Every structure is written in C-alpha cells, then in structure tokens.
Image (spheres, rainbow, N blue to C red):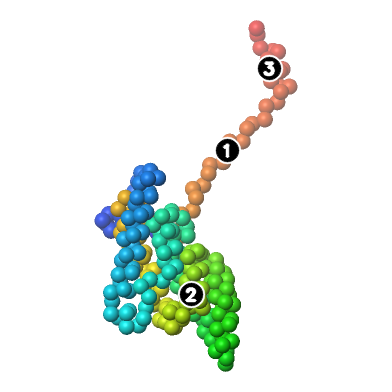
Amino acid sequence: MASRLARLPWWMSHWLGYRQEAVKPLSKYEVALWSFITSFCGLSVVQAIFHYSDYFIDRNVPGIIASYGASAVLVFGAIESPLAQPRALVFGHFFSALTGICITKLFSLMPDQARFESLRWLAASLSTAISIVVMQLTGTTHPPAGATALLPATSEEIWQLSWYYLPVVLLSSVMLLVCALLFNNLHRRYPAFWIAPAPPKPVAPSPVPVPVDVSLADEKAAKSPV
C-alpha cells in the first residue's frame, strides 16, 4: 500500500498518511494538545451532520452514535494502535451494527412482546459476543464497536432505526475517518497502515562462532620461536 501511495502527488499522499521520512515525534504535551483539538473537531463535524440535517432529523437519527465517542479516543488519541486504523474503524463498526440488528430482530420475532422486552439483555450480550468473534475473524477488531452491536438491543432510539442503523453507522465511520486523515496529518501521521501492517524487516542472522581446537593452538604456540 505504501508503494501505491508513493506514486501519488505529495499533496495527496500526505493526507493519506504517507511520508518519505520518519515523522519527528512530539512531546507528550504536544500529543495531548493535538489529541484534544482533533477529537473536538472530529466529533463536532460528525454531530453537526446529523444534528442540523433535516434529512436525518426527519428520520429521528440521534446526533451521534454513542460508541463513536470511544472511537475518537483511538483515532485521535492512540493513532498508532492497530485498533485505530481505517480498516478496523469502518468495518469493525459496520460488522458490529449488522450483528446487533440481526440478533435483536431474531429476538423480536417472539410472539409475546413482553417476552422480547424481558430478554433484551440476552440479545445485547449475544450481539456483542458474536461481534467480537466476527471482528477477530475478519481482522477488524475495534473495541468501541462492541457498543455499536449492543445498542440495538439496549436503546429504543437505535432500535427504531431498524435497518437504517447500518447506513448511519457507515456514514459516521467514514466521516470520522475523513476528519482523522485531515486533522491528524497536520502535525502527526495517520494511518500507520490501511489494510495490514508492513511485515517486519528480516533480521540478519548472527555470525556462527568458529570452534577453536585448543590442543592445536597450544601445539602451534609451543613450536613458535620465542
């Protein structure tokens, strides 16, 4: 992936996380400052889209899916973590949302509505547990997505979105990713990788010591002139 980014113009590849040289590390105070600025801006952009758009207001979409607050901690505060990379962010949330909706809808098929309400806790637990397995198998583990799977069963507001929950989650992930690319690359580098981390460089094998025949060395020393 890095080789493909290198072919792009610098003004484009820079915002996609490519650097020809290593980025100078920031002090912990600079990291804290930029984490504050970027997370504030990123979450504000995502909330503004859903809070002020009549299209989403008419469909009773919440201002933000709560699990994206936790995602902001990763994509703005722990940008080098494998859990914060684009693949995990976008697909982790999407697979978890799909799992949560499917499991909760299966429980909702019970003929007795009261029975469904009494077992929502079980649907929530099962949704998150299955989403963890799905993320592990697909290499998209993103811890905040566990809450994304949980919400259809625990939040009536999210449950009422039904299948529309999926595009809302996908749009939220993409917008948070766009903000992370723009804001993090001002003074840092994000992402560390797009699909998979670069394989480690092979380590040169250590030279094998040549055994010395002690008796032969003593014999040569005895024959050498003083």
What residue do we see at 48% from left, 74% from top?
Answer: 151
Task: Locate the C terminus by quadrant.
Answer: top right
How far separated are the C-alphas under marks 1 and 3? 29 Å
Can you identify the residue that label 1 sits on? 206
What residue do we see at 39% from left, 68% from top?
Answer: 173
What residue do we see at 66% from left, 12% from top?
Answer: 224
Q: Which one is nearer the viewer's eye here, 105 or 151?
A: 151
Element under label 1?
Answer: loop
Residue type (three-letter) at the residue carrying disc 3? Lys
Can you identify the residue that label 2 sits on? 151
Residue type (three-letter) at the residue carrying disc 2? Leu
**Which residue, as the protein is rendered here, is positioned at the far bottom?**
111
Packing grade of label 1 (10 A; few <14, some 14-19, many >=20) is few
Packing grade of label 3 (10 A; few <14, some 14-19, many >=20) is few
Q: Which one is nearer the viewer's eye here, 1 or 22?
A: 22
Q: Please state the horizontal and vertical placement of residue 104, each as a whole percent of the image.
A: 53, 81
Q: Please state the horizontal and vertical placement of residue 47, each as a whole percent of the image.
A: 33, 69
Packing grade of label 2 (10 A; few <14, some 14-19, many >=20) is many
Can you identify the residue that label 3 sits on? 220
Q: Which one is nearer the viewer's eye here, 136 or 3?
A: 136
Element under label 3?
Answer: helix
Of badges 2 and 3, the one in the foreground is: 2
